[in-house]
Every structure is written in structure tokens, then in C-alpha cells.
Amino acid sequence: MLNKFRNILFFTILLFGLVGCSSKSFHNDMIVKTKKSLDKKNYEDIKRSYSDSLVTEKTKSKEFISVLEDKSLADILKEMEILDGNFYYLKSSDILIPKSRIKIHNIEELNQYLNAVLEKELFIKKNGSIYLVKLLSLSETKKRSIEHIPFRLNGQISVEELIKLITAESGYEVSIGNYIDNRDDFQNSVISISSKNLKDALNSLAHAKDVFVDVDYDKEVINIQRFKDVVIELNIPLLDITSSNTTSLTQTSSEDTSGESKLENNSQIVLYDELDQMLKNIISTDKISTYHIDKASGLIFLKSTKSIANTVRTIAKAYESSFAREAVIEFERIELLLNKSREYGIGTISDSRQNNAATGVTRGLAENGAFSFISDNATRLLQITATANNEIGKILNYSKNVLVLKNNIPTVQSITDNTDYVEKIETTKDTDTNETTSDITVNTLKEGTSITAMAKISRDKIFLNITPSIKKLIEFDEVNVDLTTIKLPQYNDQSYNISKEIRLGETSIVGSIIVHDDAKTYQGVLPLEGFAIGGSDSKSYVRREIVYVVTLRNIKGF
């Protein structure tokens, strides 16, 4: 019985083992065979076919561009690329296209739409695989087209025949304006011409007959005129340039310095007078040509022939080139009170760093109050000192600033005190009402010193022309007018002119002027017994010398 049970158990275990092994082996074989029969491409096809069976998809190509909503020209060109397969690049400014229910199918219809609603046109040029697009006005498009019309001529031809050819090639009407002396002679005259396109032909006609040839692209007319109104701009500095600053050094003792000097600089262009005379000479033989120079704006208004207009433009360019030059100078102003034994304080000083091996000019105010100029030039060893111990005199003021001199433009630096006074009174009496009215004229006396400087600028030097001047109030004369007392000033006015050449890097005294002041104004400032001198009216005066020193630092505009 036990043996029989063991046999049954053995066969049962064996059966389960056989069944398990058989099932596992079949699954693995199936996986292996499936992997061998399917590669990645077949597997993708199975997935795609399965998904396609779930979704019905229809592909429809773009047939037109809609402008029912706001779109820019750049946006429409992007849609046009999808529509026709070309590549477009917008070179002009982008604009908003007006809305419409119209459907745009191609670039030609887009051009027609823009022409109709905006009066503009697309100018398209192919460059490789890209189409370059510009949106132009109709006149600009016509201008581009007419300028590139082939027009090959080489030889002599009458003006009349040339006009006929121009009309035939361009379709434009040719209009001959007024002031052509004899139209028949003008049209029958023969000119030499060599042209490749219509633009060359028009320029040749204008040059040969001294006429203006202008194209009106909107009206499609070519106008030929002997005279024309022309505006030419002079790009030169403003007429009046004024600035002021405070830069000073006033010595009140041997140790302390204080005080102020007000410097005012202004420039005025006087060469308009020369330009006016030149223009007058240019058009003197022409009875019709006229001109006007607007000094405020720097504009020249001409009614002239083409040759005269070209001549004036050449002169204007020469003026612009001249005024572009400028010299940067360091301008120093020294005021000395001279003792009674000195007629002049600082005599002369110059240092040329280009011609001599010099260490330059040094200027300084020493602790003992001495103001010195020292030049170590081998050919000119000079030391000039104004000291507080009255060897020459006493430093009253010292100021230094930088000036930029434009070529041939006067610049004025002045130190003045303004005094207003009543110059005249005009009274009127009404005979009916017996009322009297007065009109008072007030004027201003600018008392002080000034220097006018003008430079002719070369590449490495300037020719400096300076005019120091002084205006000094003596007293007011009282005058009675209709029981009213007014004061009229009496003053001394003195000036002189000097020209000097200064090289780049050179320091030079360019001028000085002697002023006589009332000694009473200096009481308590200096010992009058060492400075006061007698005058013709038995009053005491003090000599004040104003010295101007210039250093040429830089030259620009070449």
C-alpha cells in the first residue's frame, strides 16, 4: 500500500513538472520569434496604422491670406512664404495693413491691394534665394524705374531730337519753362552726349545748356528751366556766441589773495560781408538772378542759373571747411600796478618749443608776492618779476581761461562794469488837453577793458590779430531839460591793434595796455607815495598795466 502511494505521488510531481516546463518554454519561444520577426521600422508602422484607424485626418494647403484682422506687412510676408514657398525680407519700415474682406492669393494681388488702399507699391528685388522687399510711394517707384531706363547715346544730337527720344523712352511730357532766351535756337542747338541710362542723358542736357532739368514723378513731367529758386545752407557757427565766467586772483597782501574778475567772452561772424560782396560779383552780369543772405539762420536764398548755384555751393563748402578749423589757446590776463619809476612792467616774453630746446615758460606767484615769468630758452634768457616790494609794481589781478578760436571769427573777452544813465528826455505837449508826456531814453555805459582776438589758423601755427581797448568813465555832466536834470557821461576810449604769429606749444605776450586810475581809489591798498604820479590837471594817478599772454595748446580741423 505504501509503495502504491509513493508511485502515485511520484507520477503526480512528474506530471506537474512536465506541464510547468512545457508552458514556460512556449511563452519564451513566442517572445523570441516575435522579436526576430519585428524590427523598429515595422513596429512604428504597426503603431501608426493603429492610431490612424482611430482618427480621421485631412490635410488642406493654405490657399489665401486674410486681412480681416490687424496685420503688419511683415506678418503678411511671413504668410506669403507659406503660400508660395518663397523667402521675403522687408528692408523698409513695417506698417499696419488696413483691414478688408479681400483675400490675397499671391504677391501680385498684395501689391495691387497696397496700391489701392495706401497708394504705395512693393519694390521687389531677388538676391540669391531671398526676395528683398521695400514699400515705396508711387513717386518713389516711378523715380526708381525712370532712372534705370536704358538710354545709350554717344555723339552729337540736337536738343529737340534728344527731347523727342526722352519722351519716347520714358512716356513723360517735357516742359520748357520761361526765361529761355530763344526757344527755337535752344531746341536747334547741338550738344555732345554720352549716356548709358536716362538719368545720364538728363544730367548731360542740364550741364551742356546750363539749365535745371527736374522730374515731377507724380505728374510725369520733365521740367526744363533757366532759373530756379534754390536754398543753400551755410554750416558755420552761430552769429552771436556769448559766455561769461568768474576766474580771478586778486592780491591784497603779500600772502593773501581774494576778489573776483568777471570775464565775458563773445564772438561775432563778420565775414558775411565778404560773402555778400562775392555773391554780388558773381551775379553782377545777370539781370534776373537775385540773392539774400539770412544771417540769423545761415541760409542763402537764390534765384539763379544752374552754374551760379553751383558756384555759390562751392563757396559755401569752402566757408564750412574754413570755419571747421579751430585753435585752443590758454589766455592769461595780468593786471600790474606800476611804481612811479616804471612806465611799463612786463616787456616781452616768448618761448618757441619747436625751434629751440627749451624747458618752456614757467609762471608763478612766490611766497614773497613776486610774480615771475622765466624762460630757459638758450637764445632768450629772460626773467621778469613784479614784486610786492615795488621793484616793478604790485600784482592786482591775475586770471586764466581757455578760449577756442574759430578760424577768422573775432572773439571778444571783456571785463566791464555797466552803468545805466539817462541819455535824453523827449517831451510832448497836447494842445487840446494841455497835458505833457515825457519819453525817457536810458543807455548803458560799459566801462572797463576788453580785447578782441581773431586768428587765421594754419596747420602748426596761428596768425593772431588782437585789439586791446579800454573805456573809462571820467565824470557825469549834469544837463537840465525841462526842469529835469540828466547826467551825460564823459569817458576816455583808447585801443590799439597788433598782429603776431604764434606756433603750436609757444607762449607769448601778445599785447598790453596802460590805464591811468585815480590814486584815491587805491588808498589803503598800496603806498601812494611810491605809486602815485602827477597829472595834467594836478590830480594824482596810478599806472595800471594790463598784459595779455597766449599759449597755443592745440589746433583742430585739418
Image (cartoon, grey):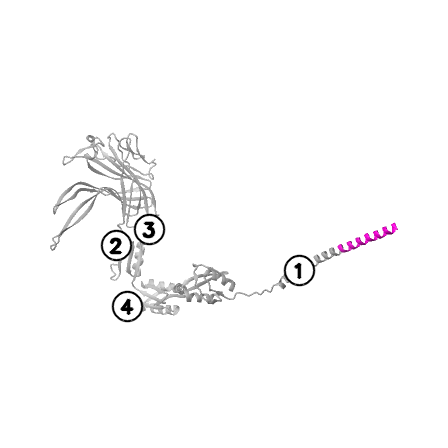
Tell me how far mark 1 sits from mark 2, CA to CA.
Answer: 94 Å
Q: Residue at x 67, y 58 (%)?
A: 39
Circle 4 residue: 182
Q: Position of residue 231 (x, y in %)?
A: 30, 58
For residue 479: magenta?
Answer: no
Q: Position of residue 203 (x, y in %)?
A: 36, 62
The nearer-to-camera label among 4 and 2 is: 2
Q: Which mark sits nearer the N-terminus, 4 or 3?
A: 4
Tell me how far mark 4 sits from mark 1, CA to CA.
Answer: 93 Å
Q: Position of residue 267 (x, y in %)?
A: 27, 47
**Magenta-drawn stretch, dominant element (helix, strand or loop):** helix
Q: Which residues are magenta?
A: 1-24
Nearer to the camera, 101 or 547: 101
Secondary element under disc 2, as helix, strand or loop, is: helix
Tell me how far mark 4 sits from mark 2, CA to CA.
Answer: 32 Å
Circle 1 residue: 42
The nearer-to-camera label among 4 and 3 is: 3
The amino acid beneath tag 3 is: Ser
Marker disc for residue 321:
3
The amino acid beneath tag 4 is: Asn
- Whether the residues at callouts 1 and 2 have beta carbons within 8 Å, the answer is no
Marker disc for residue 276:
2
Q: Which mark sits nearer the N-terminus, 3 or 1?
A: 1
The amino acid beneath tag 2 is: Asp
- Whether the residues at callouts 4 and 2 have beta carbons within 8 Å, the answer is no
The nearer-to-camera label among 1 and 2 is: 1
